[in-house]
């Protein structure tokens, strides 16, 4: 079991160059971990958020084409019936 002295030897509180480099390394690894987590979370949510509007747009295009075709057929029958 580590004591308080062991903790101070791992994270010393002096202002030496070795200590500053050690803290920079620890902070760099910590920030890299946070950035990787955010990047992964953002990429997953961005891809999920882009799929639903795309599916909605495709459905709207298909429905628009169907309505156009049906209206054209009715108009064609109506115009041939009157002649």
Image (spheres, rainbow, N blue to C red):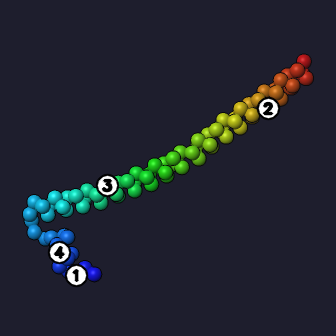
Whichever of labels 2 and 4 marks the residue nearer the N terminus, that label is 4
Q: Are marks 2 and 4 in contact (CB under 8 Å)?
A: no
Whichever of labels 1 and 4 marks the residue nearer the N terminus, that label is 1
Residue 32 circle label: 3
Whichever of labels 2 and 3 marks the residue nearer the N terminus, that label is 3
Frontmost residue, 23 versus 54: 23
Residue at image coords 75%, 34%: 67
Is 35 situated left or right of 43 in this image? left
Q: Secondary structure at mark 3?
A: helix
Coordinates of residue 58 in the picture (x, y in percent): 64, 38
Frontmost residue, 42 versus 14: 14
Q: Secondary structure at mark 4?
A: helix
* Mark 1 Cα-neighbour bin, 10 Å: few <14, some 14–19, many ≥20: few
Residue 8 circle label: 4
Q: CA distance from mark 2 to mark 4?
A: 79 Å
Coordinates of residue 71 in the picture (x, y in percent): 78, 31
Residue under label 1, please give it. Answer: 3
Frontmost residue, 45 versus 69: 45
Residue under label 2, please give it. Answer: 70
């Amino acid at each position: 079991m580590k004591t308080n002295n062991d903790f101070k030897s791992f994270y010393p509180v002096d202002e030496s160059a070795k200590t500053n480099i050690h803290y920079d390394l620890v902070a760099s690894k910590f920030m890299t971990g946070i950035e990787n987590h955010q990047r992964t979370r953002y990429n997953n949510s961005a891809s999920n958020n882009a799929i639903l509007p795309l599916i909605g747009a495709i459905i709207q295009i298909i429905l628009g084409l169907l309505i156009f075709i049906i209206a054209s057929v009715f108009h064609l029958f109506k115009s041939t019936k009157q002649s």
